[in-house]
Image: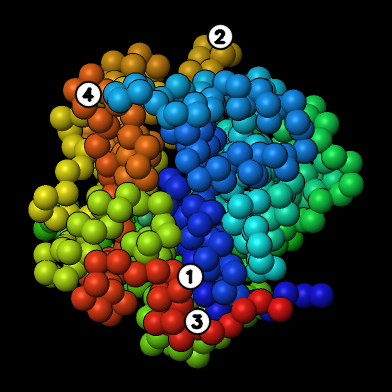
Amino acid sequence: MVAALPLVIQGGMGIAVSNWRLARAVSSRGQLGIVSGTALDSVFVRRLQDGDPCGAVRRALAHFPNREDAAEILRRYFKPNGRAPGEPYALLPMYRQAVSAFRERVTIAANFVEVWLAKEGHQGRVGINLLTKVQMPTMASLYGAMLAGVDVVVMGAGIPREIPGALDALAVHAPATLKFDVDGQPADAPAVLTFDPRAHGFVHAPLRRPDFYAIVAAHTLAANLARKANGRVDGFIVEGPTAGGHNAPPRGALQLNASGEPVYGPRDVVDLAAMRALGLPFWLAGGEGTPEGLAAARREGAAGIQVGTAFAFSDESGFTPDIKRQVLTAVAAGTIAVRTDPRASPTGFPFKIIEMEGLAQQDDSRQRLCDLGYLRTAAARDDGRLDYRCSAAPVREFTNSGGVEAETAGRRCLCNGLMAAAGMAQPTETGLELPVVTSGDGVRALGAIARGRLSYTAADVLSYLGVGASTPA
Ligand SMILES: Cc1cc2nc3c(=O)[nH]c(=O)nc-3n(C[C@H](O)[C@H](O)[C@H](O)COP(=O)(O)O)c2cc1C
């Protein structure tokens, strides 16, 4: 049976903002809940080190197909009483082109657990969101999510041309490959990432091949993916530059306004007639999370909308309660702003950061350290080996591996900053890593949902959008 298309997709928001609780709240009410798979392996081992207080991680892990791995993961990372005050989290080895089988299985297990929990206790569909630019953990993440029966994969922040084919392969437990972007690698001998499910030997029955939705900021990219992806694309999320998180850069040469934000122009407006002509369902994202936005999107031929910001500050999301309360207080007072920072993200994409008084966030004074490494990219050395580097890492580390110093200016460590915003800040010598809080421009309009309160639920968001009453068949 073909599942009915959702009117509302709850956007995947990393790190751990779109957690299993949020996705379950949305999916169990008949819309599409999405978990964020970004850096989920580190989130998973941090939850275990914090004692997994509600027991959810262990409950899901008990269903993981490989019992030995589940036991080994618990042995290494689970702390029944949590960490001692100030005790740093134990870290996973950072991803590289090839990692150990156990390291891969931690990623598989983390994604399995998150999807399993999001699907627990209802019949609704659940999706997972990954960033195309974060290449190295992708296939293990997808496979783990598929072992738990994920229904939809949503990917943007790059051009996910090879993901549909990888999903086809993983569904039959066949090896999958992705081209690996390596700086300085000869074009006639591209580097690849390979993932072989058989090396893990979990199950043999074919898995459901999830639907694949690509996030695009241009109809030309959608057309290109529909034609040239190496497998089936099932739909598109058309995301504009007001959306939270990373934004696609403006077309053409980068121009900045007086406050140093990228200027978007008519060339960045997506041609919805061209989208309709592709004949695949699409959802509009970026400041669309209002009843009027949903109605307008439907009139334009969209199946519905993808909403991030409104869900990001709901009770179920992964932002810390303190961040949510502070943000909703500033929303009520009208003292919140969002800045599109062209430098903050090591990916080079514009990234939105909340600006408000009293919210301590990471800045240039951070003692640079790269210990999570999800945004590291690879560069080929003369001897053929690879260097891994991130422009938010210590400057010397970056330049020693061939990076240009100017690239490091203004960069934020999004790995540690986003992890801190989700309540898993790494202790440092001087305190805790400080958060980086991202949001869409639409945060200023959250008063319509909060209605004077300093907390609201995902169900409140759905009711506000006028889709609250439906439940999945
Ligand atoms: C806190 C936050 C984090 C986000 N992280 C991601 C992400 O990891 N991957 C992604 O594809 N989109 C991400 N987004 C974008 C959302 O999935 C969604 O497309 C967008 O928020 C829709 O626009 P809106 O915020 O105006 O509702 C993020 C948005 C927010 C608010």
| Residue 99 position (above or below residue 321) | above
Dot 2 corresponds to which residue? Answer: 383
- Residue 159 at x, y = what percent? 55, 51
Q: Amino acid at mark 1?
A: Gln
Disc 1 Cβ-to-ligand 1 distance below 8 Å: yes
Marks 4 and 1, Cα distance to the nearest angstrom?
36 Å
For the residue labelled by badge 2, is the local secondary structure a helix, a strand or a loop? loop
User: Circle 3 is placed at which residue position?
Assistant: 468
Which labelled disc corresponds to residue 306?
1
Q: Which residue is mark 4?
A: 367
The span from disc 2 to disc 3 (Cα, nearest Å) is: 59 Å
Q: Say whether disc 4 or disc 1 marks the residue closer to the N-terminus.
A: 1
In this image, 239 relative to 108: left or right? Answer: left
Q: Is residue 458 left or right of residue 101?
A: left
Q: Amino acid at mark 2?
A: Asp
Gap in angstroms between the C-alphas marked 3 and 4? 45 Å
Tell me the mark number nearer the camera, choosing from 2 and 1: 1
Compare residues 303 and 330 and report the one nearer the observer. 330
| Mark closer to the observer (3, 4) | 3
Question: Which of the image's four quarters has the N terminus?
Answer: bottom right
Residue at point 68%, 26% (across, down): 71
453 shown above or below 300? above
Q: Mark 2 near mark 3, Cβ–Cβ under 8 Å?
A: no
